[in-house]
Image: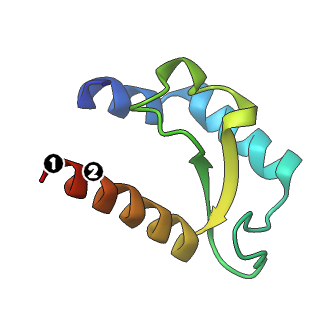
Amino acid sequence: MVAARALRRFYGSAAWRDLKGAALYLKGRRCAMCGRTDRPFHVDHIVPVRVAWAARLSMTNLQVLCVPCHGGKKRRIENAKWRRRK
């Protein structure tokens, strides 16, 4: 697992900002899950950075998701972690 401090540094880095902009340009402003184009977007790591640190700057590990779909994905991941702990 990656430390929270390293994650904050990564998400504040110029490399991430540049890659995020390139992903929006190359992949387009369309949600990969629902197909909507009329909402704000997140550039999402398909395999979370905490799990695959080496893939954090890989374009193939990125997808564009609208805010609601990104939130739903994040909740599913968090719920799965919680269920494993029980």
Residue 81 visible (yes or no):
yes
Q: CA distance from mark 2 to mark 1?
A: 7 Å
For label 1, the crowd category at 10 Å Cα-Cα, with few meaning under 14, some 14 to 19 and many 20 or more, is few
Specify the farthest residue to the top: 54
Q: Residue at x 49, y 26 (%)?
A: 52
Which residue: 60% across, 45% down?
46
Task: Say whether marks 2 and 1 touch (CB < 8 Å).
Answer: yes
Q: Which residue is mark 2?
A: 81
User: Mark 1 — residue?
Assistant: 85
Q: Quadrant of residue 82?
A: bottom left
Quadrant containing the N terminus is top left
Observer able to see residue 12: no
The answer to whether 10 is drawn above or below residue 83 in the figure is above
> On residue 48, which mark appears?
none
The secondary structure type at the circle numbered 2 is helix
Amino acid type, callout 1: Arg
> Crowding at label 2, few (<14), some or many (≥20) Cα neighbours within 10 Å?
few
Foreground residue among 21 and 78: 78
Q: Nearer the viewer, residue 46 or 20?
A: 46
Please give left or right for residue 33 compared with residue 8 in the image.
right
Left-right relation of 9 to 61:
left
Q: In x, y percent, where is residue 62?
A: 67, 42
Q: Amino acid at mark 2?
A: Lys
Callout 1: SS: helix
Quarter residue 22 falls in: top right
Could you tell me residue 57's position as x and y percent? 63, 26
Q: Position of residue 64 (x, y in %)?
A: 70, 57
Q: Position of residue 21 (x, y in %)?
A: 72, 44
**Residue drawn at (46%, 33%), measured in percent from left and top?**
49
> What residue is at 77 percent from the left and 51 percent from the top?
24
- In the rendered view, does 50 fall on the left or right side of 70? left
